[in-house]
Image: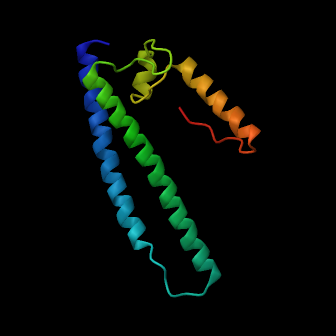
Amino acid sequence: MDARKLKATRQRLTSEHESLSRSINRGRLAAEALTVEKTEDEGDLATLSHDRELSYNLQEGDFSRLRSIEGALKSLDRGEYGVCASCGEDINEKRLEVVPWATMCIRCQGEAEMEASSRGVASGREGDGPEL
């Protein structure tokens, strides 16, 4: 990847990092607003519980992506950006355009997902594999 593309990628990753950080902070404030109300209505309690779980799941996804972006920025600093963590080959630039924090090439990512999926099926938890 040439220097111009690397600079643009760094800017994109930095922008995404800042945006996610703001989103996480807004999510924390929203979660704090979901306080236990003094109600015995089962419907209200179920809605509150659902809202909290949804907020938690969204934040977990954001934190995971934030860690991936931080890893990509570190690999840029080390001059290792765009190299598959599994096989050591270059990750296709088109893949990096779509998922700039990708750590594996398509082939290795697919193999990792198949392995995770087969472990999930064997343990009775189908569909718990990592996403692209």
Residue at 37% over, 42% down:
66
Residue 38: x %, y % from top left: 50, 87
* Quadrant of the frame with the N terminus: top left
Identify the colour scheme used. rainbow
> Eyeballing the image, is 92 above or below 18?
above
Residue 116: x %, y % from top left: 64, 33
Residue 89: x %, y % from top left: 45, 12
Residue in the foreground of this view, choosing between 52 and 85: 85
Residue 105: x %, y % from top left: 50, 19
- Residue 124's quadrant in the figure? top right
Q: Is residue 97 left or right of residue 87?
A: left
> Eyeballing the image, is 35 above or below 82?
below
- Residue 73's quadrant in the figure? top left
Q: How many marks?
A: 0
Residue at 58% over, 78% down:
45
> Eyeballing the image, is 16 above or below 28?
above
Residue at 28% over, 44% down:
18
Residue at 47% over, 47% down:
61
Residue in the foreground of this view, choosing between 80 and 61: 80
- Residue 41's quadrant in the figure? bottom right
